[in-house]
Image (spheres, grey):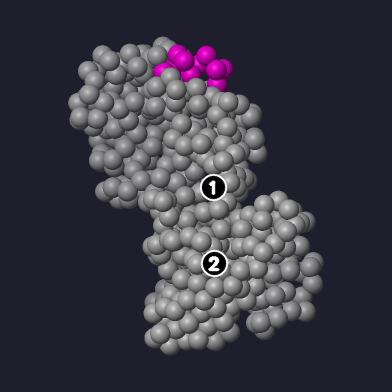
Amino acid sequence: MQEKVEILDTTLRDGEQSPGINLNAKEKVEIAKALERLGVDTIEAGFPISSPSNFQAVMAVAEEVSCYVAALARAVPKDIEAAAKALKPAKKPVIHTFIASSPIHMQYKLRLQPDEVLKKAVEAVKMAKEFGVRVEFSAEDATRSDWCFLKDLTEAVIDAGADVINIPDTVGYTMPWEYEKLLSYLLTEVKDIENVILSVHCHNDLGLAVANTLTAIKAGARQVECTINGIGERAGNASLEEIVMALKVRGDQFKKESQILSERLYQTSRLVSTLTGYPVPRNKAIVGENAFAHESGIHQDGVLKEKSTYEIIKPESVGFPQTKLVLGKHSGRHAFKERLQELGYSLNEEEIETAFARFIELADRKKTVHDKDLEALLSIQATRVLAKFELLELQVLSGNDAMALVKLKKLNGSSESTEIIKEAAAGDGAVDAVYKALERAAGLEVTLLRYQLESTTAGTDSFGEVMVSIGYNDKTYLGRGLHNDVIRASAEAYLQALNRIFAEGSEEDGADFS
């Protein structure tokens, strides 16, 4: 039996720190459930002290999943207290506390001497242990730290009760051979290190995050920290799907395995892409659109004769879908439900009914609904928020000096009362005019940061899938729309982003640190 490597997924914490990502509690829970179905051992749900909404999101995730749930905390008492409170509903809570250990961080960021850093680390671990949780300690910027000091620090926090020791490559600086030497040194020289889990967390600044992580596994790491699609600070983190499949495909080299259900990788990747607004590059390993595409005649000939000539991974082993033309407006609920299951989606009856109603709307406007259409439809459904406004009518007079008229239904609180709002605006083109009219109707002034339009499939009857990000009060809000009329899809995407602003306002008002 092969030795197990634990997977700590930090998509909801480090991944969300990517510029432009702003997940609400509902979206974090949606991703957390998908991560648990995927088989991750620990979900790092957030940094509770950073904001009331982050605190609430960590608590919401802790209530919904059964695996380990980690909350990040600096080596500061108030951080650790907030993390412990947010983790109260968790069945398997983890307080992840950290402090920088490299000379450059201690001198310029912390302005502390090494002995002061060591003292704070020990006090933080002892305090966290008092809450009866698993405690992980991270020496931030470990790969640029003095090895002797790192050894002393590691021994001290183990003696203080740490259960997991993380040696992160915080700025993606180290080379694989350097990392191997550092980890081998610690595993050999640190007293009692065999009694804790050695973990690694690698960043991708030099494009070596996955290589360094795999090297660490070979060296003896028993936990790796990574994110779906490799998202994260700056150039991102080690990509979960790449690590998992490297262990699976090259088991002869590692003799170790994870408990990840690889057949769910593609679906989870798509969900994270949808909710974060970060598209997956077409040439992304494992889950990119081109991962199993072959254009070269030589490659096509080889694959047709024997797939293993050019495919070292079977598409179905990562849940990669094959496009099928199977559904139309005459299809029933049973066929629809079966197709969703084939694509890897697990929805409850209420969600299926909602999705089926939208599917029928799509099928009425398009002869055949493709798998890509279904994925887009479910992506839109997953990103829906409690609406403040609903789009009832849209009229556009196109041209360079376009005019747009929007008619919205405003939902007033939890009551059944509604208000109809009409607004018109001129703009430089149809989309600009529509967006200005929507802003007037919603009473908000926002900045359009990004507009992306893609067709779900080939052909003139393809649907337009629009994704936008808008800026408001120094925060970014995402919206998606799907329609065979790209102007309508653009309007729906923008309105969803505007609704997110109101939804987050309600969420913030309800935050409670008591």
Q: What label sits on residue 441 in the rendered view?
A: 2
Task: Determine the residue positioned at 42% across, 81% down.
Answer: 429
Q: Quadrant of residue 1?
A: top right
Give the residue at x 44% y 25%: 79
Q: Residues within 10 Å of mark 2 (few under 14, many from 20)?
A: many
Regarding residue 320, the answer to whether it shows in the image is: no
| Residue at 58% across, 62% down | 379
Of residues 491 and 427, the one nearer the viewer is: 427
Tally of marks: 2
Q: Which secondary structure, mark 2? A: helix
Tell me if residue 382 is in the magenta stretch.
Answer: no
**Viewer-nearest of labels 2 and 1?**
2
Residue 221, image quadrant: top left
**Looking at numbered disc 2 in the image, what kind of residue is underneath it?**
Ala
- Element class at badge 1: helix
Ranked by sequence position, the earlier of labels 2 and 1 is: 2
Rounded to the nearest angstrom, the CA distance separating label 2 from label 1 is 18 Å
Give the residues drawn in magenta, as a range. 124-133
Q: Of residues 447 and 459, which is closer to you in this image?
A: 447
In the picture, measured across the screen, residue 154 lies left or right of residue 12, that is left
